Image (tube, grey):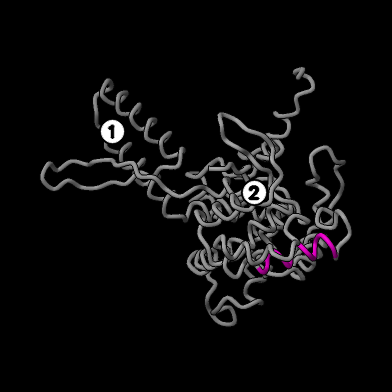
Amino acid sequence: MAEEDDSTEELVKHYLNLEPNLTDLYSQWSSADRNFGKKAPRFTGVRILRQDAWEALIGFICSSNNNIVRISQMVEKLCIHYGPFIGQLDGQSYHDFPPPSALTGKNVENHLRELGFGYRAKYIHQTAVMVSSEREQGWLDSLRNPESPILGSKLGSAGEMKPEGRDGYRLAHEKLLDLQGVGPKVADCVCLFGLGWGEAVPVDTHVWQIAQRDYKFGKGKHSSLTKATYDAVGNHFRKLWGKEAGWAHSVLFTADLRAFSERLTAKIEMKEEDSALPKKEEEEHEEEVVRIERAALTKTRVKRELDEEKEKRVLQIENVSMTSSERVKRRRRG
C-alpha cells in the first residue's frame, strides 16, 4: 500500500484521542480543583479512548459486578465465537468484534451462559435484538457527540454546556437506559468512551468513595449513593472540570487505584534513596528506575518488601491484570 494511502496512523491517533493537549487540560483542571492539582501531576498521560459505541456498550454490560480479567475474557470469547474473521498472523487467528445482528440468534443466550457470561448473557442477547431489530440502522451512533464524530465524519456543534451536561448528552443517556442491562453508570460509560460525551461521569462505588473522601459527599441528603446523589456527584464534577469532566474524573480514578499508587510509591522512595548517592552510582540507579518503570508499563507491578535478614529492599516484579485499554483490542484465538 502506498504511504499516502495508509490511514493506519490517522486511525491510531483518532482512537487514542491524541489531538487534545494534555498539558493544557491538566492545567485547566488543576486551577479549578486543588485536589486534582495535588494528585494528577503524578499520573500524566491518561487519555479517554474513542471506542466503537457498540463495542463499548457490550463491554460495559459485561463489566457489571466483574473484574478486568474476566471482562477481557468475555470480550475475547464474543470475538472468537461470533466475530467476523480478520486474518492470521504468525499462526494466530484474529476476529473482529461481532455486530449486533450476530448476537440475535435463538441459541445465543444459552451459549453465552455456557461460556461463563452468567446473567449478562440475557442482557447481551436482548440488547442485541433491540439494537439490531427494534432501532433504525445507525441509531446508536446517532447519539454521538457531534464534536467527537466518527473518524472521517464532519465536525459539528454540541450546543451549550449546562450543569447537568449538554442536551445531547442527556438525551443519549436517557435512550441508553432503555436497553437491557444498562443502568446509569453503564450508560455514562458508553456516553464517555463510546459516544464522545466528555461530561459523562460514571459513578461507581470507587468514585463514590473518592467523592466522600475528597469532596465532602456522604452527609445529609447525600449520605448514600441514590439516583439523586449520583446526579449530584456528576454535576459537581462537571461544575469543576467542564465539558471534559469525565476525562478529569478518570485521572483521579486512576490515581486512586492500588496498582498505580503502589508503583508510584515505590518509584518515589527509590528516587529519594538515590539522591544521596555519588553521581556515578546515581546514574546507574536512575537506569534501574527507568528499567523498572518500563516493566510496570508492560503490565507489571512493583512490590516492595523488607528482607529482615539482609536489611535491604528487594523489588519483585509481579504480573498484574490487563488494563482497561485492552477491553477494546481486537481479540485473537488462543
Residue 8 lies, in percent from the top left, at 71, 29
User: What whole-number distance in Å separates the C-alpha atoms at marks 2 and 1?
Assistant: 47 Å
Q: Is 124 one of the magenta-colored residues?
A: yes
Horizontally, residue 275 falls left or right of residue 221, namely left
As rendered, which of 232 and 93 lies closer to the eye? Answer: 93
Where's residue 78, x and y in %?
Answer: 63, 53
Q: The residue tagged with tag 1: helix, strand or loop?
A: helix
Q: Which residue lies furthest to the top in this view?
A: 2
Q: Residues within 10 Å of mark 1 (few under 14, many from 20)?
A: some
Question: Would you say residue 2 sits in the magenta stretch?
Answer: no
What amino acid type is highlighted by mark number 1? Asp
At x 50%, y 45%, the residue is 43
Q: Quadrant of the N terminus?
A: top right
Looking at the image, residue 73 lies above or below residue 112: above
Which residue carries the number 1 mark?
A: 274
Residue at the far bottom in the pictured view: 220
- Of the image marks 2 and 1, the number of the one nearer the N terminus: 2
Residue linked to disc 2: 79
Judge from the rendering whether residue 249 lies leftward or rightward of residue 51; answer left or right: left
The residue lying toward the viewer, choosing from 237 and 310, is 310
Q: Which secondary structure, mark 2? A: helix
Left or right of residue 233, residue 214 in this image: left
Q: Quadrant of residue 64?
A: bottom right
Picture mark count: 2
232 w.r.t. 258: above or below: below
Residue range in magenta is 122-133
Q: In which quarter of the image is residue 204?
A: bottom right
Nearest the camera: 289 or 93? 93
Type of the residue with mark 2: Cys
Report which quarter residue 124 is drawn in: bottom right
Task: Please tell me whether mark 2 or mark 1 is closer to you in this view.
Answer: 2
- Tell me what residue is drawn at x 86 percent, y 49 percent: 157
